[in-house]
Structure formats: C-alpha cells, structure tokens
Image (spheres, rainbow, N blue to C red):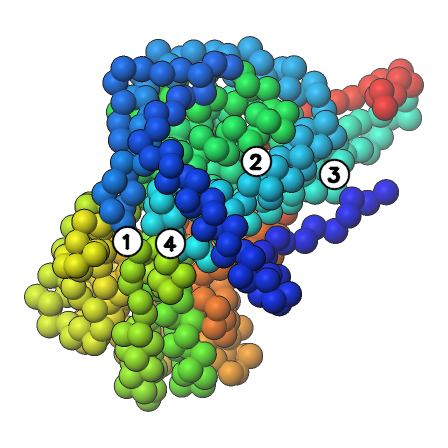
Amino acid sequence: MAPPAFENENTVFRMAQAGKTAELDREYEEALATLRKRAGEGLPMLVAGKEVRHPATFDDHDPATGDVIARFPKGTAADVDAAVKAAKAAQPAWERLGWEGRAAVFEKAAGIMRRERPMLAALMTLENGKNRVEAYYDVDEAIDFLKYYAWQMREHKGYVVPLGKPFPDETCVSVMRPWGVFAVVGPFNFPVAIPTGMTAGALITGNAVVLKPASDTPWCSHEVVRILHEAGVPREVLSLVTGGGREVGQPLIDHPQVDGLVFTGSRDVGMRNYQAFVGKRPRPYIAEMGGKNATVVTRNADLEKAATGVVKSAFGFGGQKCSATSRVYVHESVHDAFVAKLTEKARKLHVDMPWKKEADLGPVINAGAVETFEAAVAAARKAGGQFVAGGRVLKEGPLAKGHFVEPTVVVGLPLDHEAFRQEYFVPFVAVGKYHDNEQAVREVNAADYGLTFGVVSSDPEEVQWFFDRVEAGVQYANRDRGSSTGAMVGGQSFGGWKFSATTDRGAGGPWYLTQFLREQSRTYAGGMRPPQ
C-alpha cells in the first residue's frame, strides 16, 4: 500500500483561511511570555547520552535588545570526540532498526514539533529576530522535513531495488546503506528548519549525527535535538555540541571517524570545509553556500506583481535568506515605473521589535551584519548610487540597543559593481537597467552563485527562455509572494548551482536522501533469495 500523500503544514495560511489568526497570535504571545521567564537560563550540551555543562559559557543574545536569553557551554575537542565515538558505536543498532522503524520515529517527531510550534516560533523571535509570521513558517518547514523524509522512505521502500537476473539461479538486489556518522553544521537564519532538515536527512537513512549549531542560535537547535530524542532517536545516536568554530566546529570536521558533513553557511567557510574534508578521503559533503539571487523584470511584466514579489523576497527576514533577491534587472522601458512602485512599497515597511504583530522587519542578527550593511551603503554611495529607500542604521529610540537597519534600495550603480556580485545577507537590493534579454541573462549569470532566480513576464515563451538559460537551481516566474524566495518542502527542491552548493540534489526534494546513502549490490546465487 502506498503511503498517504504528503501535505505541507502551511499553518499561517490555513489559520487565516479558517479565520483563526487570533488564536495563532494568542498561542505565540503566551509562549513568548513563558520563555521570557527563562531569560538567562544555563542550558547544557547533549553529548553521548548525557547533559554536559562547563564553567566556561557563552551568551545567547536577543538581537533586538541585546539581552542575554540563555547561556551555553563552550564545548571542547574532548566533547566532540566523546560525541563522535558514541555516535560511531550506536549507529549500527540504529541502522538495524530498519527504515520503517526510523520513519515512524520521525513521524512521531513531527507530531511533537507540531504541538510545540508556538514555543519554537516565539523562541526563534527571541533568538534570531524573525517576526512571528516568518517564525511560524520556519517551524512549519521543519515539520514538513520530518514528514516528507519519512514519506520518501516509505515511498521508496527504504531504497531497496530488485535488479536483473544475470543467471537463472541468481537474485540481485540494490541496497542503499548509510555511511556512518555525519557532522551537521547549521546556520542562524533558519535555526529550526535547516538543522531539522539536515539532521533528519542523515538520521532517517540510518546514520548517526553530531550537530553543531550556529553560536547565534544554539537554543533552537537544542530544542530540535530534545524533540528528536523524545520521539525515539537514541541519545547516543544524536548529540549536540555548542561553541565556536575553532573550538568545536573544526575538531568535528577534522575528526577521523566522521563519515560525512552537512553544512549551510557562507561560501568562504563552505569552500574551506570542502577542501579540508573531501581532500582527506572520499566521503559526502553536502553544502549550501548562499546566493546572489536575481530577479528580472521584463518589458512584459506586471509591475505591481513584480514590485510586491521583490519587496517580499529582498526584505523578508531582513534579507538574511540564502534565497533573498539582492539584485534586480529591469528592462529600460519599464525601469522608472518599476522603481517608483518598489520605492513606495519599501518605504512602507515597518521596522520594529520582531515580536510585535505589526513588524515587517526585525533586527539583523548581530553587530557584524550591521557593519556589512554600513560597508555596502558606503560602497554604493562612493560609486554614485542613488538611495531611493533606506540606507540608514537605526540607532535611536526603542531600537537603539538592537541591530536594526532600514530596508534599502539603490539604483544607478554600474552593473559590474560589487552590489550585483557579492552576497551581503542584509536588507539591501540593487536595481539596474538592461537593454535586451540576452544582456539580462549575461548579467544574471555573471555572479559566481546560482541558487535562486525570479522572472516576471506575462509571456510564457519569454519565461521559458529565461529558465533555459539562467544558471540557478531554483527558479520562479511571476511569484508575488516572493520573487526568488519561499521554497516549500515537496514543492520546490532547494539546491544551488555553481558556488551555491556542492551537490546537485536539493533539500526537500525527491533525491535529497540518496546523498546520505551509498549503494551496495547484493547477489544471492544457487537459488537463494534475500530474506523478506
């Protein structure tokens, strides 16, 4: 019997359709109030089945206020070693549980995470500044990963495939087997969804995992690991180590018993990891390393739809998405009209404390992100760019203690300026003119990245023309809910080309899990058949 069809959570949309948005807000605010009472709490690492605390800790800050919301241990190489060795020892039994048993564990985890969705969304707001709507979407994506990967295992029957019969007395089978122990290194921007997806991908295929979260968002990963343990993942099979890249991240990547690495983060760190990790011995390295994502607005575009989609994609979560639109190429015949609409919408965005219902944007993640924003503004100003919206750091009033910047639109820059080439990861978008579609494609493909791309055009042949020529792993046409953002598990496989990724199979898509497995061909001769 085929497994039930997969269906996305889509909580915000469903509750709005049912007229229950107020209920969603009430649950969020109650969870936020409960979490505030825990401010400054010391939380442990979860290593080799034990809670581990150290006298040396680091602070987990709220980027909107600068307040300390939690404290975590500064992990060491010894903690990493204990976690990896425990994972290595426990992994064979986890594999022997079988794909059906593991799928059931992750289906249970999805139910637990659904129950705790308001808490996770509120925690995310406190820890990385995501507003309540985006935080709910993040948690929903995590639940979708748990359900979808369990569904994939059932759909493919554990990736056991009968092969041909070279001789009458032989039965041949292809079996996909786990590699062993995966290191998972997560990002700050989707602190529930991405660590959940990467960890679930490794675990559900029979591997063990040691997870190192971003030091800006360790609490969210702590809750993810707690939920997976509660659902039935053995504590030795999944460990959480916290701390800096030098103290914890590098020892994890360098550990000789780590058989695979999953990473989401910057290109510089990702490529450095690639050279260090894969160069030692053949093993999988699954990395997503950002994007410099473009939207093209053609002469045939609906400009209202184009401006709406670009605003949502460029400024959702302050541009801190790998898929955010950060450059727009507009046909010269509609450039001024488009910029007018984009400017109007960008100026209306409300920057505020992220837990407030009216907040469109909260803070960027830390002081380093503010410095990046300031440098981008300075570089654009020096090159003669015109700021039609934003351009300022917000340092006054109730926002003064946080990391707040304005959503920014700049026009008039040369198309080879760094604003069209470098990933900033802040709410900053550059708009340029193009003369014909050939030029637009050349400019889009000139960047080293190839993650997402959007085009706005009423001509389906023109859309297809761009899709066939643009070098990007995820492509959207006429999407006013986000011109280059908003991938949904099971709907848009999320993976990049060029320097955006190291593999060619996107997260939340039909081929993702196969990256955590290696094929073993088995032949049973003499009339023997494999056990059922």
At label 1, counting other C-alpha atoms closer than 10 Å, the crowd grade (few under 14, some 14-19, many 20 or more) is many
Amino acid beneath label 3: Arg
Front residue of this view, candidates 371 and 124: 124
- Taking the spot 44% from the left edge, 34% from the top edge, the residue there is 221
Alpha carbon separation for disc pair 3 and 1: 41 Å
Earlier in the chain: of badge 4 and badge 1, it is: 4
Q: Amino acid at mark 2?
A: Gly
- Position of 80 compared to 468: left or right? left
Q: Disc 4 designates what residue?
A: 355
Instruction: Work out whether residue 80 or residue 74 is closer to the camera in this orientation and state it.
Output: 74
Q: Which mark is residue 154?
A: 3
Residue 362 is at least partly visible in this image: yes
The x, y position of residue 456, in whole percent, is 45, 76
Of label 2 and label 3, which has the lower sequence position?
A: 3
How crowded pointer 3 is (Cα within 10 Å; few <14, some 14-19, many 20+) is rated as some
Q: Secondary structure at mark 4?
A: loop
User: Could you tell me how far apart the alpha carbons at marks 3 and 4 are, in whole angstroms?
Assistant: 39 Å
Disc 2 on helix, strand or loop? helix
User: Which dot, 3 or 1, sits closer to the camera?
Assistant: 1
* Residue 502 shows in the view: no
Percent across and percent down for residue 281 are 43, 22
- Element carrying mark 1: loop
Q: Which residue is mark 2?
A: 201
At a point 26% along the width and 27% down the height, the residue shown is 58
Q: Which residue is under mark 1?
A: 363
* Label 2, label 1: how far apart the Cα atoms are: 31 Å
